[in-house]
Structure formats: C-alpha cells, structure tokens
C-alpha cells in the first residue's frame, strides 16, 4: 500500500486515510480525512449563522420538498418502532418486575437490546426491562441484560 503526506499535519499516511479526488494527479486529496474533518467542523462552527440562514432560505423557497422530507423521516421513525400498545408494554414490564441491570422495581421502562437506530427489531424478542436511569445510561450501546436461558 502506498503512503501520502498530509498537507496539514505533515504525516505520512496510507491512501485509505485520504478522500478520492479525480482532479489531483494521484487521485487523492492533499489533506487526510482526519484533518479535513477537523477543518470542516471548525469552519461550520465559525460560520454557523450563515449555514443556518442558508438552510432557512432553502426551506422557505422549497416548502413542498421540506414537507415531503419531514413526512418521509416521520414515517420511517414511526414505522421502525412497531405497533406496541401501552398495555403490551406494561404487561411486559409486569412480567419481569425489576430492572435487569440494577434490580430496582421503580421507574421501569422497556428498552431495546439492539437499539432501533442500529437496526434492532421493534418486537418483543428485542426487549428488556430497565429502569429509566439504566436505560438512559445504556443509550445506543448494545448490552443484553436478559438472563441466559439454557435449552
């Protein structure tokens, strides 16, 4: 694998650390991905008001596309959660009766072992009972607190 020197950090890095660029002779950008990301983040923070204004102008100029985008993302979000009813969730919590992480019996909620955002299933086979603090602490991590069942 060939290496290339980043124009910003001056380090020699493998070509996989550079974005492709057909306009450059070697086919890669002169700045590594890490340096480019840092520059982009700083530039966006420095010009946040400009980006916000541009986004607002686009939304005003294209209300139909904005509405379609919001509807599409809402449909995706609600379709992913599945048709759980509050009674179904409460029955599942009552069946377990305690937080599988810390053992408390207060403020219980249903958690997805594999979060929906990471492609987890919305159904009961992906549920576990956690208290709200443990559920919040888990966030998007994939942690299975359910007891192992031997067959």
Image (spheres, helix red, strand yellow):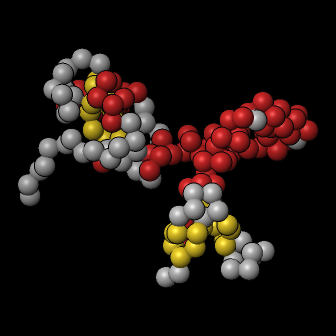
Residue depicted at x 64% and y 43%? 41
Is residue 144 or residue 38 the one in the foreground? 38
- Report x, y in % for residue 74: 63, 39
User: In the displayed image of the protein, which residue is found farthest to the left?
Assistant: 150
Is residue 55 or residue 75 the one in the foreground? 55
Compared to 114, does 15 lie above or below? below
Residue depicted at x 58% and y 69%? 5
Left or right of residue 50: residue 81: left
Residue depicted at x 36% and y 48%? 114
- Report x, y in % for residue 70: 71, 39
Where is the C terminus found, in terms of image quarters? bottom left
Compared to 11, does 54 lie above or below? above
Left or right of residue 104: residue 67: right
Residue depicted at x 14% and y 44%? 147
- Is any atom of residue 63 visible in this view? no
User: In the displayed image of the protein, which residue is found farthest to the front?
Assistant: 10
Q: For residue 45, what is the image quadrant?
A: top right
- Report x, y in % for residue 27: 69, 77
Left or right of residue 102: residue 73: right
Q: For residue 111, what is the image quadrant?
A: top left
- Is any atom of residue 18 visible in this view? yes
User: In the displayed image of the protein, which residue is found farthest to the right?
Assistant: 61
Compared to 79, does 104 lie above or below? above
- Report x, y in % for residue 149: 11, 50
Callout count: 0
Q: For residue 30, what is the image quadrant?
A: bottom right
User: In the displayed image of the protein, which residue is found farthest to the bottom?
Assistant: 1
Compared to 62, does 110 lie above or below? above
């Amino acid at each position: 694998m060939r290496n290339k020197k980043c124009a910003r950090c001056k380090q020699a890095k493998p070509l996989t650390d550079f974005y492709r660029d057909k306009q450059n002779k070697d086919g890669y950008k002169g700045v590594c991905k890490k340096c480019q990301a840092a520059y982009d983040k700083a530039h966006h923070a420095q010009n946040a008001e400009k980006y916000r204004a541009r986004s607002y102008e686009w939304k005003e100029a294209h209300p139909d596309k904005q509405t379609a985008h919001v509807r599409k993302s809402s449909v995706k979000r609600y379709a992913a959660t599945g048709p759980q009813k509050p009674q179904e969730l409460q029955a599942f919590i009552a069946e377990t009766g305690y937080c599988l992480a810390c053992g408390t019996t207060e403020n219980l909620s249903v958690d997805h072992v594999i979060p929906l955002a990471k492609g987890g299933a919305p159904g009961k086979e992906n549920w576990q009972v956690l208290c709200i603090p443990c559920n919040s602490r888990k966030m998007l991590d994939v942690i299975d607190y359910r007891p192992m069942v031997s067959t």
